[in-house]
Image (cartoon, rainbow, N blue to C red):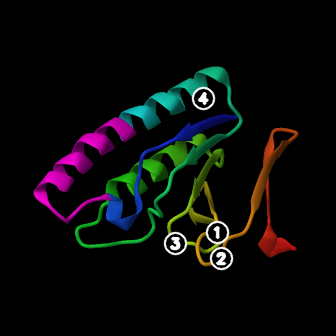
Amino acid sequence: MLFVALNVQGSNNNLGRTKVMDAEYERRMAAVFDWLDESIAVAESRGARRVVVLMHADPFLTHTPDGFARLRNVLAEHAKWLKGRLVLVHGDSHIYKDDEPLPGLRRVEVFGAPFVSWLRGSVVAGELRVESAAQH
């Protein structure tokens, strides 16, 4: 497995507030997409069974302008390429989820305030298993 951390913030990914923040968003997301593409290439070259992407933001929340639209598209393309081997772990919305919001993309959303709880991930025989307080 390859674990990749991305600098993607909540609150619309810092987009649509001021010109300075919009410029920061553009520079940061260019670096995020480069890092993600490079990481996927490394995972492929090493034969990784899974790529786990970690970030703060919930990219499935939509705003105007939408600070996550391109990220969702890039994740969708990587999910197609990786054929069920891409896992996204994020926070932001504060509600536990373990679902498939895009074909081939497993999403695990962790708890957050006011529901402070635990989440444990483990790798068993090459498969990612997630256990949460919600399951107990």
Q: Amino acid at mark 1?
A: Phe
Q: CA distance from mark 4 to mark 3?
A: 28 Å
In what quadrant of the picture does the C terminus appear? bottom right
Q: Residue furthest left?
A: 19
Image mark for residue 43:
4
Q: Determine the residue positioned at 75% across, 63% down.
A: 118
**Counting residues from the N terminus, which is met first, the one under dot 4 or under dot 2?**
4
The answer to whether 29 is drawn above or below residue 133 in the figure is above
Residue under the point 41% across and 51% down: 8
> Mark 2 sits on what residue?
115
Chain part drawn in magenta: 14-32
> How far is the residue under mark 4 from the one under mark 2?
34 Å
Mark 2: which amino acid? Phe
Which quarter of the figure is the N terminus placed in? top right
| Disc nearest the viewer among 1 and 4 | 1
Residue sitting at 24 percent across and 41 percent down? 27
Percent across and percent down for residue 24 are 22, 47
Do tag 1 and tag 3 residues touch (Cβ < 8 Å)?
Answer: no
Is residue 100 shown left or right of residue 8? right
The one nearer the camera, 123 or 126, is: 123
Residue to which mark 3 is pinned: 93
Question: Rounded to the nearest whole Å, what is the CA distance between mark 1 and mark 4?
Answer: 28 Å
Left or right: residue 64 versus residue 72 is left
Where residue 97 appears, x then y in whole percent? 65, 70
